[in-house]
Image: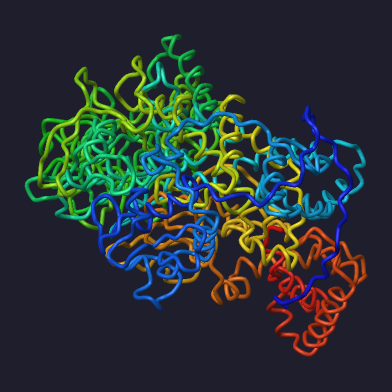
Amino acid sequence: MRGLSALWLSYVGLPLALGGLVWSTPAPEPPAQRKVDFAREILPIFRASCFPCHGPERRQGGLRLSNRDEAFKGGISGRVIIPGDADNSLLVKRISSDEEGPRMPKGMTALSPEQIERIKQWINEGAHWPEGAENAVHWAFVPPKRPPIPEVQNRAWVRNPIDAFILHRLEQEGLSPSPEAPKETLIRRLYLDLIGLPPTPEEVDAFLKDTRPDAYERLVDRLLDSPHYGERQALVWLDLARYADTDGFEKDLRRSIWRYRDWVIEAFNRDMPFDQFTIEQLAGDLLPNPTLAQCIATGFHRNTMQNLEGGVDQAEAHEHKLYDRVDTTATVWLGLTMNCARCHDHKYDPIQQREYYQMLAFFNNSKIYPVGDARVSEEKWLEAQIPAPTPDQQRQLDALTQAIEALERRALPPLPTLTPHQVETASGAPVATLPDGAALARGQTPDTEVYRVRLRLPAGELRLIQIECLPHPSLPQQGPGRAPNGNFVLTGVRLQVNGKPVAFRDAFAEFVQNGFQPRAVLEPNNRANGLAMDGHIGKPNTLTLLLQQPLRLKSPAEAVLTLECLYERHTQHVLGCFRIRGGYGDSARLMELRAAKRQLESQIPTTLVMEDKPTDQPLTAVVRPRGEFTRQGEVVEAGAPAVLHPFPADAPRNRLGLAQWLVARENPLTARVQVNRMWATLFGRGIVETLDNFGAQGAYPTHPELLDWLAVEFMERGWRMKALYRLIVTSATYRQSSRATPELLARDPENKLYARAPRYRLPAELVRDSALAASGLLNRMVGGPSVFPPQPEGVWDIPFNADRWITDTDANRYRRGLYTFWRRTAPYPAMVAFDAHSREVCLATRPRTNTPLQALVLLNDPAYLEAAQGLAQRMQKAGRGSVERAIQYGFRCCTARYPQPQELNRLRQLYERMLERHRAHRDATRKLVGNEDSHLAALTMVAHAMLNLDETITRE
């Protein structure tokens, strides 16, 4: 069924408004075919593929292509460029085949057919090489200026300036844009691009019925305002930020940093300007009076992997983290392969090795928290981690703090002592009652002990019981325990009042020994945990137990408090001296509030943040010759590459200054790189195809003027990403049909000219999200800790790590893929099959593969089977007894359109076959749908087939 065909229709576009553009000159004549620009289209090819052997440093065969005169002169083999005659030019012959010798470039990736055609066209046009062009500044290092909007013939097609640039190029190439896509396609395209979820049939119907002239724009605005917009955009950014829930390397331990992921989502939803978005992530902690959110934002550079293996040189491991921060910063904001300059000067871009370490110096001031023993190579260098309450937790904390402070101002009396009138011991050991109401055990120390303390409770509202564990000179090490080291382990506490058991809801202590949990005293038959005091011997400690419900006593009552010291690992760990207090009135209420605050604080997530050491000295770094950590070169101060704009004179030479330098209007790269990335999010490829490389070896922009216009527009609109997205998606270019005619396939197979809309498979997370959305199972909650949906057994069976994947059984198993727990050494396999990244390092572009494994995931993964079951239930309900209506509804959930008659017929045939099969095999029916409803089972199989359609997992 994956090959289910769809009939394409031809759509005729209606004349469109000019979108506010003003045309002041007559329409031009049809332009001739555009000539090749040497500096922009040929020189980058020479630099990347020819200069390594025939450039300024090496001249193999006597040929130098980095100088105009010497290039036309040729080498040992004679002239290689014959202007006007590409067929007889040796350059063309050597890059096209191996008939004249080894195909060039030797030992490197062969030139693409498009690059070869460009070189041939350039030679046939006369091989125009402007004097000094080879020495010109690379285009990406020249700050963008707003170019004029080009004139076009088909003005009616243009909706905004983007279209003018696209159409101008199409007309130069003798091509026409495609007609507008049908409304069903447009709404699905917008939903997937802007919020990452497909529209429901009901949402599609509402859009189809909306006849207002601005219906499309209203839809765009609604999606941009959706809380799911931030989730869709965060998906791209988290790949760049190399976000993961574990450290990486062999141990790959868990880390808590999901609050950074949520900050990214919220920043996109709030439409935070990209310059501020940059500053807060690189240096939020260095802003004046930084907020918690600004500190959380600095988790961007704490996503770096952390090597905690035994025997690792922590200084070297830390420096590798700094390398990652430099490389990632350069990739994300500059689009440069700066990592090439770590060991030597960059071979292709004007970046010196010392400039790499000048960039590294900005990050070379992290505050380090050493843990472990350096003497046995077990010291680990950790960086800052802070509590990061969610907004809801912060509101609760504030309310509790206010209530506590109000009671504390009243100078409440201490809790009354409940002096026991009898203490019985299971061992028979005597217990003395001291003048202050405390009980002290005497005699020989038993291996274990159980105290039954008989008390008289005053009338009133009892809220809690306190057990004070007290030191005493008669005890070993002064106690409070009777073990030789003065310790004890209290394993259980029980309370009876007037012969009836009273339950506790929580227990906490002022001091807790590592590895022990005071709350374990509430568990029946506990012998392995509880309250212990190693590290606090000879000092008092208090265990507070909160009653499940306040106990209202109209008159005094008899109570028995049972204290169990039954620790199974060591003998004689019994409590030696203790005092009991009862919690009544506001004093007890204060204790409860403190307990509630303590419990809430224990639930607050932590997150990794950047934190610098205070210094008034310039930040420096040591240049590492050949990139070797054990070698030291010159010491350099923090600074930026000289090829780019100067560092602001008034900016601090730290991470904050670096961030300000990156988003300065003079920076030629940041705006270009970001708008190119946003364009790629919508069109599947960037105007510069190499999203992570705007240098000499990167691709040349297909529409350089459009790229510069968008970059300037982006900055002048205040770096607002929603505004730029709105501009792009409301263009006629974006709204084209994705139908590829034979002419377009022949002339522009990769759709670099944008004569049609792109068509490509959804990202891994969206493949899963779309299935869950279509099924109605999707949990649309935004934010929160990472979740554990079903995955195959054994994926986490990793040596030296006992951590295990515990599959969620509640609604968390249906959360969006963005929230799936991401382990670097064993990422979620169903998403890896669809090219999700391990996130060990920054990634600007995911590959798109097409493998049999992807089909097997859709067929066999439990998530997609559950989605099919959920979709079938929706189909059955919507069908109201009609199989045809049910199939149509399910098909629309998956594709947003009605099936064509032949598609409906084939799906109906599948339904009939499955119905017959499940009527004959009741066991299979029960296994599939939980009952003997063969109709639902047949619809489930049809739903499964529809979720497997190429169209379902494809953005049209």
**With respect to residue 617, does 511 lie above or below?**
below
Query: Which residue is rendered at x = 16% and y = 49% of the image?
Result: 626
**With respect to residue 365, does 942 lie above or below?**
below
Compared across the picture, whether 853 is left or right of 210 comes to: left
Q: Position of residue 792 (x, y in %)?
A: 49, 70
**With respect to residue 398, does 54 lie above or below?**
below
Regarding residue 493, the answer to whether it shows in the image is: no
**With respect to residue 755, does 749 lie above or below?**
below
Quarter of the image with the N terminus in it = bottom right
Compared across the picture, whether 929 is left or right of 532 comes to: right
Q: Position of residue 449 (x, y in %)?
A: 25, 49
Extreme residue toward the left, this view: 375
Query: Which residue is rendered at x = 32% and y = 19% of the image?
Result: 652
| Closest to the observer, 64 or 497 | 64
Regarding residue 386, the answer to whether it shows in the image is: yes
| Closest to the observer, 683 or 306 | 683
Q: Which of the 4 image quadrants contains residue 409?
A: top left
Q: Position of residue 920 (x, y in %)?
A: 79, 90
Q: Position of residue 46 (x, y in %)?
A: 39, 54
Quarter of the image with the C terminus in it = bottom right
The scheme the figure's colours follow is rainbow
Q: What is the total number of numbered labels drawn onto the structure image?
A: 0
Extreme residue toward the top, this view: 410
Query: Which residue is rendered at x = 82% and y = 48% of the image?
Result: 203
| Closest to the observer, 484 or 297 | 297
Compared across the picture, whether 75 is left or right of 828 comes to: left
Query: Which residue is rendered at x = 38% and y = 27% of the image?
Result: 645
